[in-house]
Image: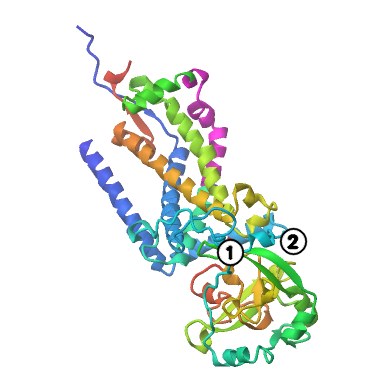
Amino acid sequence: MNRRRSFLIRGLSGLGTLFLAGCDRLSHTAWFPPILDSAESLTYRAQRLVTSRRSMAREYTEADLSPRFRSNGTAFPQDEEYLALAQGGFADWRLRVGGLVEHPLALSLDELRAMPSRTQITRHDCVEGWSAIGKWTGVPLSQVLQRAHPSPRARYVVLRCADPMEGTEESRYYESVDLEDAYHPQTILAYELNGRALPIPNGAPLRLRVERQLGYKMAKYLMSIELVEDFSHIRGGRGGYWEDQGYEWYAGI
Amino acid sequence: MAKEIPPIDVRYRRHSAAVRVMHWINAIAMLALLMSGLQIFNAHPALYWGASSYTGAGPIFSPGPFPGWITLPGTQWLSMGRRWHLFFAWVLVLNGAAYVAYSIASRHLARDLWPTRRELSGIGRSVADHLRLAHPAGEAARRYNVLQKMSYLAVIFGLVPFLVLMGLGLSPSLDTLVPGWVDWFGGRQSVRTLHFAAGALLVAFVAVHVFEVIVTGAWNNLRSMITGTYRVPRGDER
């Protein structure tokens, strides 16, 4: 009886220690994180099932605006080409739209501003846990896509940015969203924040807003967008800079 | 002279196999959720009230980061913490839903957890008994006492669903489900604060739960949740 008891207690405390040390070790294995990742597709499907394609993120009023909209990640891209464009007031900057489209485009900031626009006061939720509220004005991504006329094979929009994250050409920020989010009415390419031209720390000249996902999806310093069938051949293959570092591609949670 | 009582204990099956399995799945899920939750908290270790963190008002609570021995993983690694958290959140919810369905279907809920009117009228005495650490013995120990029943019900149908709901409220996608629902709780940053506070309450519940398990017979209780067998000492019967 007593021996059984001490065996069990030792067994349980051993299990406890194993749990703590084991969880840490499991995180470093090749086989275990994919099991954890199975939750991501479950979450993606469950959330897409319960929310409608057109469900709208909460919009706020001017009174709710954060006094200063926090800049996170890159605040000033260390890139010669970008610096040259910034010095010229982005007059020579063009948004290239390519990939699986019938009409590839190269749009200047003035051309984007001449297109139909949308202004929205929304909450930006960072994966770190904080939120900030800002007023964004931009052209709905759906407008740009309609002009470019995506092929029926296109399933994702890949957004490429100017900012190198680790100093190298190959480490430039990039992101991707599916077509459901790309055509959502609140998904815009924003060129204004709080009624003024988008400041450099917040992604000048153009950034993405995808209001039903976390902040890291909302790529700043946009240079080009590309329509693709899948993104497994691009860079780390997970659809974005932070995704390649282990973050979820679907950032609706 | 009292009659000789043969020294044979009464053993009976206290917990069904289903409850035992679900109890331990739940324990593992809650531990993983707590530790990975603290990892996520450490990415921005401050809590706010309202929709946004940047209103000019500042945080209402900023305890600083939790030490590595209590976070999962043990070093700062937000993406891995999220993967653990969002996986075990599903485990907790699916296991919890299975438990509630089983408890209703098997009458575990009605038979073992729902307090009777008579028990409810004796709640004052149960509180006093708990404070004196005077625990039911003999036949009375075979049933959950009224305070135990009430706290289990409050956690199963109140605290854990609230904790899960506040977790869902942090999702920018589920925020759009019913326009403005997150604001009924004060806004997204309030929801984050409430998620944390509910987690702290759950930790307090588990601390009391483990304390009671130990003082009412650690081995007997633990065995009953592993093999199912609970022993009432013969001499204890009243």
Name the amino acid, label 2: Arg
Q: Residues within 10 Å of mark 1 (few under 14, many from 20)?
A: many
Residue drawn 49% across the image and 17% down it:
B118
Of tags 2 and 1, the one toward the viewer is 1
Q: Is residue B18 above or below residue B84?
A: above
Chain holding disc 2:
A
- Which badge, 2 or 1, is on the more N-terminal residue? 2
Residue drawn 37% across the image and 27% down it:
B12
* A7 lies left or right of A70: left
Contact (Cβ within 8 Å) of mark 2 with mark 1: no
Name the amino acid, label 1: Ala
Quadrant of image for the C terminus of chain B: top left
Name the mark on residue A54: 2
Q: Is residue A68 above or below residue B145?
A: below
Q: Nearer the viewer, residue A25 or A135?
A: A135
Inspect the magenta stretch and tell me whether residue B172 lies in it.
no
Instruction: Find the magenta span and give its range.
Output: B94-120
Q: Secondary structure at mark 2?
A: loop
What x and y, as percent, mark residue B206?
40, 42
Disc 2 and disc 1 on one polypeptide chain:
yes
What x and y, as percent, mark residue B117?
52, 19
What x and y, as percent, mark residue B98?
54, 43
- Residue that label 1 marks: A132
Inspect the magenta stretch and tell me whether residue B103 lies in it.
yes
Quadrant of image for the N terminus of chain B: top left
Q: CA distance from mark 2 to mark 1?
A: 23 Å
